Image (cartoon, coloured by chain):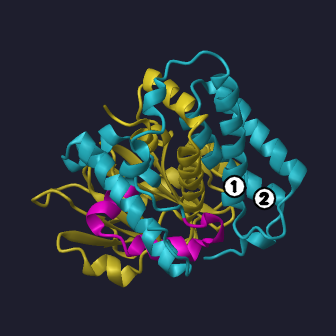
Chain colours: A yellow, B cyan
Amino acid sequence: MTLPCSHLDEFFDGELAAEAAATFRAHLATCDRCQRQLSGRMQEAMVVDEAAPVAIPIAHARARKNNTRVIALAGMAVAIAAAVVLVLWSRKPAKPPQLAMAYTVEHTGATMRGSDAHAGDIVHIHSADTVWVYRNDHELVLVCGEGTCDFTVPSIGAYSIVVLAGTHLPAPKGNLDADIAAANVAWKIVPLTAD
Amino acid sequence: MVVPVGARPLADVLATAKPALAQIADRLCATTADASDLLQDTLERATRQGIPADVRNPRAWLATIMHNLFIDRCRSAQRQPVHEPLDEQHTDAVTSIDVTEEPAWGRATLEDVRTALDQLDPTFARVYRLHAFEHRSYEQIAGMLKIERVTVGTRLNRARKMLRQVLVKRLGLEEVP
């Protein structure tokens, strides 16, 4: 029979069914060992959450990509630049973008494919400012401080990589327009399509 | 950028830590209402106590407050009849579960954690990052990486152990065998 203590990780990760979770809570009430380990898990989660996403040196990020396209904003096609300007103009024309950001897409599939990114690919973002990434403008995918951070494209969709001036901004809630308004700093958006 | 968290005011710490605390409360509690109560009680107790002078990482301190409140709730609920065979609770567990004590997470800085994560085996680090940073479920990670769900749990467990080992070494602590 499976030991209750062995379910600690599943419980803390929210992976137990309701009945099993209830049983584990009852077990927790009397098991000093699981209480100590749960305390460790909770502290770990809080400390690691603050460190996320993990910054990796740009040189390292580039070196490990045999199947990676490096895309610099300065070299992006005129059509994309025009689209960015159009988006910026429609959303907040009073604050022109003065922010630097570049990203790379690490393809995880066996072959290169045509468009920007695909579900499962890893996107590495390099910026000196805050970066928020949204899927379809209402699903927060990534919150990143200065430096380099990455995220795995969870599914197909229209992604918006939002770069905002500064590194100490209000925590985004998940709605692109509302979050930008709350931040009240200079910003710009780079679209990324995943199919 | 590493911020000396000890110098940050409590209100700032609570504001930045609240989303992560809310996620933990959701995972611990059976209902949204319970989770909301636990979060609120945690914030209130932290506000009443203030950050103790010897706390190096206030986020770990907040986790401890929430943990204690949660265990109190579990004990209160346990006073009601609960379905749990007593022979499962303590007998065999002692010899079969990893006995490594948790490191002092309250002593870990952002730099410690980042350095430790970079030292993990990439196979395990990727699963850990998907779960800890992107909050993916076991099922989602299994689908993304084309592995079994149980393998996700195994890799997460291994990643956590590795992370603890690296941190223990980095912080100069001794692991309990």
Q: Nearer the viewer, residue A81 or A47?
A: A47
Relative placement, left or right, of A125 versus B44 is: left
Mark 2 surroundings within 10 Å by alpha-carbon count, few (fewer than 14), some (14 through 19), many (20 or more): few
Q: Secondary structure at mark 2?
A: helix
> For residue B71, which numbered disc appears in the image?
none
Q: Are marks 2 and 1 on the same chain?
A: yes
In the image, residue B137 sits, relative to residue B166, either above or below, namely above
| Residue at the extreme left of the image, as rendered | A111
Q: Quadrant of the N terminus of chain B?
A: bottom right
- Magenta span has B110? yes
At which x and y percent is residue A171?
Answer: 65, 52
Q: CA distance from mark 2 to mark 1?
A: 6 Å
Q: Nearer the viewer, residue B115 or B105?
A: B105
Circles 2 and 1: CB atoms closer than 8 Å: yes
Q: Amino acid at mark 2?
A: Asp
Name which quarter of the figure residue B122 lies in. bottom left
In the image, residue A107 sits, relative to residue B1, either above or below, namely above
